[in-house]
Amino acid sequence: MYASVWYKYAAMNDKNLIAEVRSVMESIGNVAGQGAVYHSPDASLPSVNDEVCAFCSYCLRHKDVSPYCRYACQSAAMQTLTSGEAHFQRCWAGLLSVSVAIAPAGEYRGGISLGGFLAEGEDAGIQELVSQRLAAIPRVDNAPFLARLGSLREIAPSALRGLGHFL
């Protein structure tokens, strides 16, 4: 739905692009009830909508973990440039997400990711999986991350595909 919108903003300045990205992210929150994160190509802080779960919000604010979030989004968004479709993947923490590139006139300007989802029935093993992933990152205390796992939503494969089509 929104992928074609980006091409008409090719001549817009960064301020207008950022305003449009925020508008789209708020629409995602209002229509889909889902958190959305925008990562620009530079190393600036990500923009988020109000529906981002507590787990993802904590990850995005953590100085040692946020680069992994950024890499997952940027990598997935770059995949959409070649495929022309939303990209589905598991983030660094093992959670499901769907991403698209922001590329007016084919110029990469960042990516939007929706996620922090659990596959249906995945609740039981997620704590162990996240603990294993966090163990690979130096200087990270698992407890604050694990305490926020309850904020994650389960999603059916068909619903995740629906979000991809929405994007």
Image (spheres, grey):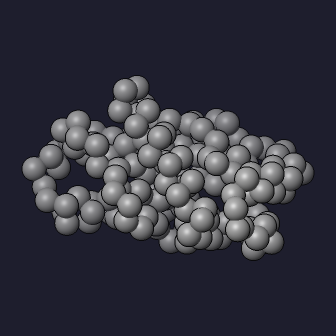
| Residue 123 vertical position relative to residue 35 in the rendered view, above or below | above
Q: Say whether residue 90 is left or right of residue 1.
A: right
Examine the rendering and report whether any part of residue 165 can be seen.
no
Q: Closer to the camera, 51 or 141?
A: 141
Identify the residue shown where x is 59% and y is 70%: 62
Identify the residue shown where x is 23% and y is 36%: 106
x, y percent for residue 28: 45, 57
Q: Say whether residue 138 is left or right of residue 114.
A: right
The extreme top residue here reads 83
x, y percent for residue 101: 37, 43
The extreme left residue here reads 11
Which quarter of the image is occupied by the C terminus?
A: top left
Q: Quadrant of residue 47?
A: bottom left
The extreme right residue here reads 124
Examine the rendering and report whether any part of residue 56 can be seen.
yes
Which quarter of the image is occupied by the N terminus?
A: top left
x, y percent for residue 50: 50, 71
Identify the residue shown where x is 48% and y is 39%: 76
Q: Closer to the camera, 58 or 19?
A: 58
The extreme front residue here reads 138
Identify the residue shown where x is 44% and y is 33%: 79
x, y percent for residue 148: 74, 69
Q: Say whether residue 159 is left or right of residue 103.
A: right
Q: Say whether residue 130 is left or right of residue 66.
A: right
Q: Closer to the camera, 51 or 158?
A: 51
| Residue 101 vertical position relative to residue 148 in the rendered view, above or below | above
Q: Closer to the camera, 118 or 70?
A: 70
